Image (spheres, helix red, strand yellow):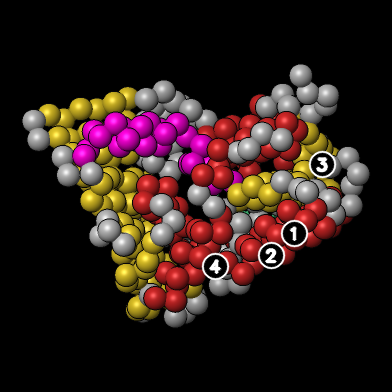
Amino acid sequence: MKASPLRIGVLGCAGIAWRRMLPAITANPDVTLTAVASRSETKARRFTDRFGGEPVVGYERLLERADVDAVYVPLPALLHGDWIDRALRAGKHVLSEKPLAATLKQATALVDLARERGLVLLESFMFLTHSQHTRVRELIADGVIGELRSLTAEFAFPQKSADDIRYLPDVGGGALTDIGVYPVRTALLYLGSQLDVLGASLHYDEALGVDLGGAALIGRADGVTAHLTWGMEHSYRSRYALWGSSGHISAHWAYTPPPTHSPVLRIERQDRVEELTLPAEDQFGNVVAAFVARVVDGVPSSLEGESVLTQAALVDRVRERALVRP
Ligand SMILES: NC(=O)c1ccc[n+]([C@@H]2O[C@H](COP(=O)([O-])OP(=O)(O)OC[C@H]3O[C@@H](n4cnc5c(N)ncnc54)[C@H](OP(=O)(O)O)[C@@H]3O)[C@@H](O)[C@H]2O)c1
């Protein structure tokens, strides 16, 4: 039994907070939403009218509040590092939208700071908490596809409105930062951390100053490869597949299944094709529960399977190796 709910404040009235994370936060009885900060009072009030808590103008003002134990940071990707740093220095636990930081150097500094201060710092890579991926891992461990030979992972969405944060080079930072991190994380999840970037390509828009999509070939010393593709100028796709010596498993709607969606795993073998329909799950609710468990109960999070630092290092290497084409 917990003594009192974890008091959470939110930095920024982001679309993802409105659509997915605040419904999950307010549904969790172990959390209280204390305050929502925005650069605009009108926006903050719109959020608190729906979800509760007090509207606050300015993120710094929220960090000064004694009635906030933890913050959720759904700011544009390139602002995460600075505001996570300020939140940790203000003594708050942090749940940050992905990616936690723009570079390995920044991610390392933040992880070190959280450790020094004894605070929880969790990257909200919500897909990792969905049990459909646990099921895939079990199937592989049971030998359903034989020995793993390769992986493909694809995540892309169509062009967004021209003022979207992702097109701002110093704010959202482009496609690799925003969406390429999902396929990269998938490679780490299934192939482990000892990976080399064998080649990469980024489609760079000179006028905007950001990359709009890309691909990478990543490999392990034993020859197992991952071919990753991402973008924000494509038709929607959110899937990955693992190909082994005797079968193939694919996960459809792998990264952003709504809470009502029952995921389907397709298993293809020499003599049969099967589809496993799994229970629907709210992966945002899972992230909130994992965060609360870490803060309140000191329970290690299931999100720690693959380190945020390994991911940041791999993203850095993709960027360094990439052939940039207009
Ligand atoms: N986990 C997921 O499934 C998922 C899905 C989508 C996005 N995300 C991540 O969540 C974050 C937010 O994405 P989003 O699509 O929700 O963004 P969004 O709707 O544009 O919201 C970002 C918020 O950041 C604040 N902000 C502060 N400085 C800003 C600036 N210079 N320009 C624009 N906004 C600024 C704004 O809040 P105020 O105006 O209230 O201050 C804005 O509402 C990103 O890191 C993204 O990668 C995660």
Residue 224 shown left or right of residue 105 in the figure: left
Residue at point 8% right, 30% down?
Answer: 271
Q: Are marks 4 and 1 in contact (CB under 8 Å)?
A: no
Kindly check if marks 4 and 2 are in contact, taking CB atoms under 8 A apart as contact: no
The amino acid beneath tag 4 is: Gly
- Inter-mark Cα distance, 4 to 1: 24 Å
Tell me the amino acid under the disc marked 3.
Asp
Classify 10 Å Cα crowding around label 2: few (below 14), some (14-19), many (20 and above).
Answer: some
Name the mark nearer the viewer: 4 or 2.
2
Front: mark 4 or 1: 1
Residue 112 pos. (x, y %): 70, 60
Distance between the Cα atoms at labels 4 and 3? Answer: 29 Å
Residue 285 at least partly seen? yes
Residue drawn at point x = 42 percent, y = 69 percent: 318
Q: Count neighbours of disc 1 (C-alpha within 10 A) and say few if under 14, some if 14 to 19, many if 20 or more.
A: some
Label 3: which residue? 69
Residue denoted by label 2: 109
Image: 152 above or below 209:
above
Amino acid on which disc 2 is placed: Ala
In the picture, measured across the screen, residue 7 lies left or right of residue 73, that is right
The three-letter amino acid code for the residue at tag 1 is Leu
1 and 3 marks in contact (CB < 8 Å):
no
Q: Which quarter of the rendered picture does the N terminus lie within?
A: top right
Residue at left 29%, top 26%? 276
Q: Is residue 17 above or below residue 28?
A: below
Dot label at residue 113: 1
Contact check, label 4 and label 3, Cβ < 8 Å: no
